[in-house]
Image: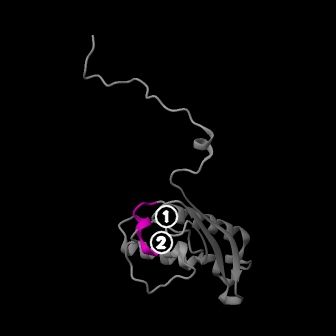
Amino acid sequence: MTDSTVADTRRLNSKPQDLTDAYGPPSNFLEIDVFDPQIVGVGRTRYTTYQVRMRTNLPIFKLKDSCVRRRYSDFEWLKNELERDSKIVVPPLPGKALKRQLPFLGGEGLFEESFIEERRSGLEQFINRIAGHPLAQNERCLHMFLQEESIDRNYIPGKVRH
């Protein structure tokens, strides 16, 4: 009673996993951390910067380990560039916190530890979602954001060649 149209449901023979497989580096990885917030400037010119560290073995990125300092407006720039030049749906950034900027409310506003941590976490989520997208990984603006010390806002948009 053998029917050739029935799918073969036998288990595939898998090789036993050794320590190198279990604890070795993953075949492809991309890790981005946003950390070490620092307040820069005084008075009305104060702003917060964040360290953005990327580690990867993806061949599209020329540097496999990079660390740059960025501020919120740099993340806004990246979002705007991707929305303008790529075909991907760009996730939202954490909010601008306009109410926190009102001087009559008192307190530290934008510079309260809890707000800075909330924003740091939101920025980390944002950049990981973007960088994990295969189409975004080809965009020159993402490479500049993650790997170059300063952002050239007059760059020519386009794809990265590898």
Q: How many marks?
A: 2
Q: Earlier in the sequence, mark 1 or mark 2?
A: 1
Query: Which residue is at a point 37% across and 74% down the rendered structure image?
Result: 85
Percent position of residue 83, x then y? 40, 72
Query: Which of the numbered marks, if any, corresponds to residue 131?
Result: 1
The residue that disc 2 covers is: 142
Query: Which residue is at a point 70% across and 77% down the rendered structure image?
Result: 38
Q: Quadrant where the N terminus lies?
A: top left
Tell me, yes or no, whether the highlighted magenta stretch contains residue 17.
no
Secondary structure under the numbered disc 1 in the rendered image: helix
Secondary structure under the numbered disc 2 in the rendered image: helix
For this rendering, which residue is in front, 35 or 89?
Answer: 35
Query: Which residue is at a point 49% across and 84% down the rendered structure image?
Result: 152
Mark 2: amino acid: Leu
Range of residues picked out in magenta: 133-143
Mark 1: amino acid: Ala
For this rendering, which residue is in front, 119 or 129?
Answer: 129
Left or right: 124, with 130 as reference point: right
